[in-house]
Amino acid sequence: MGALSYGMKAVWVKRSANSVFDPWGIEPTAVISSLGELESVLENF
């Protein structure tokens, strides 16, 4: 949330379908389920 508030991009590694992102109206730039997906997400930033 800090990075997003400062204007940076952020990726949330949502390891569980039951996980809930913080409810303050700030959404991550991308959501992935494992770090193995991170490289392909970063290529698209």
Image (cartoon, rainbow, N blue to C red):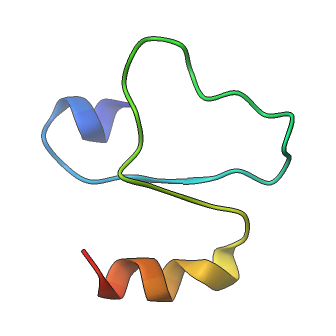
Q: Is residue 24 left or right of residue 7?
A: right
Query: Which quadrant of the structure image shows residue 21?
Result: top right
- Whether 14 is drawn above or below 45: the answer is above
Quarter in which the N terminus is drawn = top left
Q: Is residue 3 left or right of residue 15?
A: left
Figure label count? 0
Residue shown at the point (35%, 51%) measured from the top left = 29
Residue shown at the point (43%, 77%) measured from the top left = 41
Residue 39 at x, y percent in the picture: 48, 87
Q: Is residue 28 left or right of residue 31?
A: left
- Whether 9 is drawn above or below 41: the answer is above
Query: Which quadrant of the structure image shows residue 34?
Result: bottom right
Query: Which quadrant of the structure image shows residue 23?
Result: top right
Quarter in which the C terminus is drawn = bottom left
Residue shown at the point (40%, 34%) measured from the top left = 27
Farthest residue to the top: give it. 24
